[in-house]
Image (cartoon, rainbow, N blue to C red):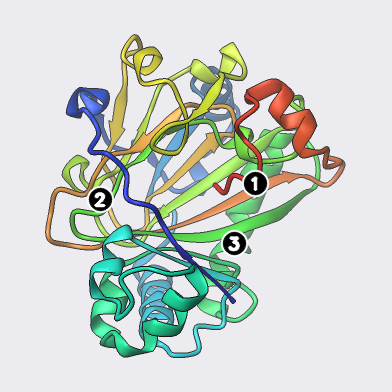
C-alpha cells in the first residue's frame, strides 16, 4: 500500500467558487432516457437524485470508516491531508519515514485527516457493489456507446477544513486518446453542501475540448480562465449521483465546516479505448503533467 502525504497548498480565492447552487432533478437511474442522454451531451453532466438507497450508501460509508480506522486498510493507496505532518513524530525526512511514524498517531486522528483512498473495490463488497449497480452501468454504457470497464476507484474524503481540489479536467490525468469517452461517477455518501466542498462544474464547457493545465496548487486549469465562466455548485444528498464527462471542468473548494465530506468516485471508459502515453497526454494538456495523480 502506498502512503501519500499531500503537500500544503495556498488558500484559494473564494471567488473561484462563486456559483449558482443547483440540486439533482432526475429521480433515479430509471428516469434516464433519450432526453436525459441528450442533456448529458449538451451539459457534460447528469445529477441524479436517489441513485442509491440508504441501505447501499450506509453500507458503503461503514466500509469507508472501517478502512480509515484500520491498521491494515487493504487498499492500494491512502492519501493524507497536509495537516497530518503536524502530528507526526518526525518533523522532517522522507515520506517513508513519515509513513513509519503514522502508527504513533491515534487512529481517530489519522482517520480524520485522510483525504483520499484508492484501489479498494475488490476488498470491500459494499463499495464494489456501487460500481457494479446494473442501472448505473446501463446509463454509462449508453453514454459511451459501447461495453464499458471501470478503470479507477477512489474515495474522496474532504476532512473538516480540508484543502481544495482546484479546477481541472479528469481527462488531463488519464492516458487515453482525446476522442475516448471517459465518464466520472461521483456518489455522495453524506449530504454535501457548497460549504462542505461540493462539486462545482461549468455546464457545457466539455464541448470546447482540452484546456492547458499547469502545476500550481495542483495540476489544474489556470485560475484566471476559470473566472470567466458561469459556474454551478451541485448540492447533493446521500445517495445522489453525478455523472460527468472527462473533459468537463470541475473542482471542489475547501471544506468550511467541522464535518467530513464522504464521496466515492469511479471512472469508466469504453472497452475499446486503448491507453496512450504520458507524452501523448502532455502534448495535449501541458508539459508539467508527468506522473500527476487524479
x and y, in percent, of residue 91 in the image: 30, 71
Q: What distance separates the C-alpha of mark 1 from that of mark 2?
A: 30 Å
Q: Please indicate whether residue 239 sits to the left or right of residue 2 in the image.
A: left
* Residue 176 appearing in the image: no
Residue named by callout 1: 291
x and y, in percent, of residue 36 in the image: 52, 29
Q: Identify the secondary structure beneath mark 1.
A: loop
| Residue at (44, 90) in percent of width and height | 71
Marks 2 and 3, the one that precedes in the sequence: 3
Q: What distance separates the C-alpha of mark 2 from that of mark 3?
A: 20 Å
Alpha-carbon neighbours of circle 3 within 10 Å: few (<14), some, or many (≥20)?
Answer: many
Q: Which quarter of the picture shows residue 115?
A: bottom left
| Foreground: disc 3 or disc 1 | 1
* Near-viewer residue (97 or 273): 97
Q: What distance separates the C-alpha of mark 3 from that of mark 1?
A: 26 Å
Residue named by callout 3: 131
| Foreground: disc 1 or disc 2 | 1
Residue named by callout 2: 192
Marks 3 and 1, the one that precedes in the sequence: 3
Q: Which quarter of the picture shows residue 40?
A: top right
Q: Is residue 192 above or below residue 200?
A: below
Q: Is residue 191 above or below residue 40?
A: below
Marks 1 and 2, the one that precedes in the sequence: 2
| Residue at (72, 31) in percent of width and height | 281
x and y, in percent, of residue 170 in the image: 56, 37
Amino acid at each position: 500500500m502506498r502512503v501519500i502525504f499531500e503537500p500544503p497548498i495556498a488558500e484559494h480565492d473564494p471567488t473561484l467558487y462563486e456559483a449558482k447552487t443547483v440540486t439533482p432533478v432526475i429521480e433515479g437511474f430509471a428516469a434516464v432516457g433519450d432526453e436525459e442522454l441528450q442533456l448529458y451531451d449538451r451539459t457534460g453532466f447528469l445529477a441524479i437524485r436517489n441513485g442509491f438507497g440508504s441501505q447501499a450508501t450506509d453500507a458503503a460509508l461503514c466500509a469507508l470508516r472501517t478502512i480509515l480506522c484500520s491498521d491494515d486498510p487493504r487498499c492500494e493507496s491512502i492519501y493524507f491531508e497536509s495537516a497530518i505532518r503536524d502530528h507526526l513524530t518526525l518533523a522532517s525526512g522522507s515520506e517513508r519515514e513519515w509513513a513509519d511514524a503514522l502508527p504513533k498517531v491515534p487512529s481517530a486522528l489519522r482517520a480524520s485527516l485522510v483525504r483520499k483512498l484508492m484501489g479498494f473495490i475488490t476488498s470491500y463488497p459494499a463499495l464494489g457493489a456501487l460500481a457494479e449497480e446494473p442501472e448505473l452501468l446501463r446509463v454509462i454504457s449508453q453514454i459511451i456507446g459501447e461495453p464499458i470497464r471501470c478503470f479507477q476507484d477512489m474515495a474522496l474524503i474532504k476532512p473538516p477544513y480540508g484543502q481544495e481540489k482546484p479546477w481541472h479536467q479528469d481527462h488531463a490525468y488519464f492516458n487515453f486518446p482525446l476522442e475516448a469517452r471517459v465518464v466520472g461517477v461521483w456518489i455522495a455518501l453524506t449530504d454535501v453542501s457548497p460549504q462542505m466542498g461540493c462539486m462545482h462544474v461549468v455546464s457545457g464547457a466539455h464541448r470546447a475540448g482540452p484546456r492547458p493545465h499547469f502545476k500550481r496548487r495542483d495540476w489544474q486549469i489556470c485560475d484566471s480562465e476559470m473566472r470567466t465562466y458561469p459556474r454551478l455548485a451541485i448540492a447533493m444528498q446521500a445517495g445522489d449521483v453525478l455523472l460527468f464527462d472527462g473533459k468537463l471542468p470541475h473542482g471542489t473548494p475547501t471544506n468550511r465546516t467541522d464535518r467530513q465530506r464522504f464521496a466515492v468516485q469511479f471512472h469508466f471508459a469504453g472497452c475499446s479505448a486503448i491507453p496512450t502515453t504520458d507524452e501523448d497526454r502532455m502534448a495535449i494538456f501541458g508539459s508539467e503533467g508527468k506522473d500527476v495523480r487524479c
